[in-house]
Amino acid sequence: MFKYIFLLYFYISNMYKYIIYAIIILLTIITIYHIKHYYKYTSLYSISQLDFNYTDYTKEVLDNTFSEKKLTIIILHDDDVIVANKNLFVKDFNTKKAEKRVTLADIYLKEISFMRLAFSSSINYNNNYTISIYNTFTSPIKKQLYDRFFICGIDGTTTIRLFNPVQEKNLYPDYNYKKYENLNDLRSKVIFRDDNTKEIDKQYPLFKNATYIEVILHPGQCLYIPTHWWYSYKNTEDYYNIHLEISSDTYFTHVVKAPRYLNYLIRNTV
């Protein structure tokens, strides 16, 4: 009797061991896949266009597009809450300020529930929704470091300049993280405006070799910017523009970004 109990105990204990091994192997494979996916990029300046519908098919198409890491403009409908209720976004804002950024109110998150689902991955960790309201303004050149990132036009037109990852050597990344809001905010040292090209050429001579494209974002359009692309946006008109930034990461993105977190700690504790 004791012999069988011992054998059963031995069998179960070994099964647990193999299960743990299997879980470790599976997590390792998934992590390697996410590392490869996170650092995957395309350097082609080609933009696809997709029509957004509230169907599961839309999510499938979007997921396939995002996995290919292609620049994509997603067309919303005129009755979409983001487009139709644009005046509600500016109700409590001081539009005289050059730029104001706030988190999207919970009331809107309920209204765009399917859009949130379609724009996020199946193993999504968190979503961030930020409303930017600005008049005459040019943003810094930033690097897109989230798993997924979108700029959605709500009111006014926004000109977005896009630099593919190959151009990074010409963009002079600034690793002084103390100046930034979060670890995903990596910027170029170059302040790129149309009126300071001579100053840039003198201080940052490689920048003149950087190529980019400009995209005019209209209300009702969402631009998907793949990971590792650099971008800046501007509005030259003297009236406010409104756009919504949607960013998200997966559980495994934080594992992939571990060296970046370590780099941040080293640079900010020395």
Image (tube, helix red, strand yellow):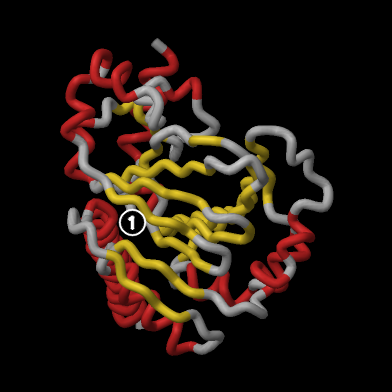
Quarter the C terminus occupies:
top left
- Find numbered disc 1 in the image and state the secondary structure of the residue it sits on: loop
**Residue 157: % across, % down:** 54, 55
| Residue located at (44% from left, 24% from top) | 177
**Residue 2: % across, % down:** 35, 77
**Residue 94: % across, % down:** 78, 39
Which corner quadrant of the image does residue 226 belong to?
bottom left
| Residue located at (38% from left, 30% from top) | 192
Question: Can residue 149 be seen?
Answer: yes
Q: Nearer the viewer, residue 212 or 74?
A: 212
Question: Can residue 17 be seen?
Answer: no
* 117 relative position to 249: left or right: right
Q: Nearer the viewer, residue 140 or 36?
A: 140
Quarter the N terminus occupies:
bottom left
Crowdedness near tag 1: few (<14), some (14–19) or many (≥20) residues, C-alpha within 10 Å: many
* 69 relative position to 97: left or right: left
* 118 relative position to 104: left or right: left
| Residue located at (37% from left, 44% from top) | 231
Q: Is residue 257 above or below residue 85?
A: above
Q: Is residue 53 above or below residue 253?
A: below
Q: Nearer the viewer, residue 260 or 182?
A: 182
| Amino acid type, residue under disc 1 in the picture | Pro
Residue with the mark numbered 1 = 226
**Residue 142: % across, % down:** 40, 38
